[in-house]
Amino acid sequence: MSDAKVIKKTEGILREDLNVTQLGLISIQRKIPPDYTNWKVGFNRSGIESEVECNGTQKYGVPHGIDNDTYLALQELYIEQGCPESGVFSFSMYQLIQMCDLQDTGGNRKVLRQSLERLSATQYWISGAWRSHEDDEWVTAGFRLIEKLVFTRKRSDIDGAKAISVTLPRELVRNIRNGYFKPVSAALLRELGQPSRAAYRVIDGLRHDPVQPDAKTRTLEISLMDLGRRCGIASDRPDKIRRTLEPIHEDLLRMHYLVEATIRGRGKNQEVHYVFGEASADPDQELVALMTSMDVPLVAARKAALDYPEKVRDGVAQAKALLQSGYRPHNEVGFVIDVVRSYGTGKYQKLETEPGRLSGKARAGKGGGGKGEASKASKQPTLFGETEETDAPRTAAAARLLLRGASLPEPTLADAVELFVEGHASVAELLSLKDDTEAVRTVTLWGARRFTAPVEK
């Protein structure tokens, strides 16, 4: 099985719901026995007696291995798209391949599709252990980690479905939107293989107070058997659990995430003791407040404050000025995040220096009709402050001509061409890719438009 790594090359911090790792919903094991289709474990979580039941299918088994990376990538994609309240977001298989830092091969596409299907097919029942952060309650809940999974394939898609839509469970969506998450170090993930990568996230999750998720300990004491259950190790034999954990400890000590890892005692009474390295930085709360004042969900606001602390103030000011000038973006939250991320690159500078220019939709709303409508019929302003013909041919040849000179990987180029032909990217947007230092990421974010109305020409 492929060994995916979730790596964001331009950002150091990823985010994931704290329940998922603390409850051990996805086994850290790279491989599982063919008949391992269900499990049930009980443990104590913050003084609450808890029981978690997982029911997979004979076809896929229970979530394990690469599913850890897939689900972290899905949460990251959801956050990047502005944390929609519906929990619905979309992406392409190529975007998921990129997020998991895999080679774009038929084998890896098959592995990731199976991973998505396994996460969608598996039912969980969590008794008294799911933390509802917004309500400050412990709840009993049943759901699938992917509540709905849709692959969309057009007749022209000879090599498989191009668009994927995922609906996350309501319980998870509410928590992420309300800040119930923990940070994950992309730099550390980059250096670890499986199962160490998945175990790091479980152990790191156990450091955090489930009631006050921002609080975490410098040391941790946990029963060996309890840790085995949290990691989803398919055995109740302490010697096997210990043999699984020992090389993981070596990896985490080597990376200085741990400064001490000891196992004391005998048999099922063994205890694991951890001493952790330096704590990760917390975001500047003033920067977080600036982002949330623009209706950016808390999780995305904290992420921006950590990843772009030097850009938040100026980026928010620029986004606010553009919105006040009358510009109406397709996704306002995503727009604000992108302005902050792109601040200093000149991506939005032209529109900012010409505040009178509105999007076609906003101009029509202000002008009503007449001469304004006639003008709109021939040309209209774009996000980048340039005008373009509304009847520009939406063909692959035209798109490739517009992209001539853009330094893009072929898969990204092909995706941009397809988005243009489908009506999900404009002429000006294609032209902007030539100067976009993060063009691959930009095209990835455009992919979310496949499940919404096409952009104006």
Image (cartoon, helix red, strand yellow):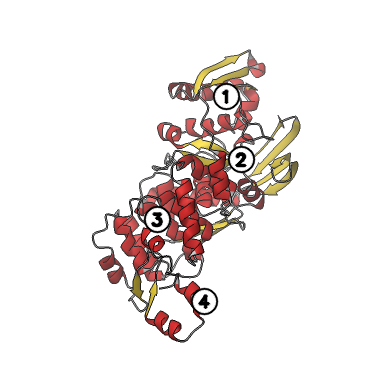
Q: Which dot, 3 or 2, sits closer to the camera?
A: 3
In the rendered view, tell whether residue 101 sits above or below residue 238. below
In the rendered view, tell whether residue 260 sits above or below residue 359. above
User: Which badge, 4 or 3, is on the more N-terminal residue?
Assistant: 4
Q: Which amino acid type corresponds to the residue marked 3 in the rendered image?
A: Thr
Spatial CA span between label 1 and label 4: 67 Å
- x and y, in percent, of residue 251 in the image: 45, 24
Query: Which element is circle 1 on?
Result: helix
- x and y, in percent, of residue 16 in the image: 56, 42
Q: In screen coordinates, is 314 left or right of 54?
A: left
The reply to whether the C-beta atoms of the residues labelled 1 and 3 are less than 8 Å apart is no
Q: Which amino acid type corresponds to the residue marked 4 in the rendered image?
A: Lys
Spatial CA span between label 4 and label 2: 48 Å
Q: Which residue is mark 2?
A: 20
Near-viewer residue (244 or 255):
255
Picture disc at residue 366: 4
User: Which badge, 4 or 2, is on the more N-terminal residue?
Assistant: 2
In the rendered view, tell whether residue 78 sits above or below residue 450. above
Which quarter of the figure has residue 422? bottom left
Picture disc at residue 241: 1
Q: Which amino acid type corresponds to the residue marked 2 in the rendered image?
A: Val
Spatial CA span between label 1 and label 3: 43 Å
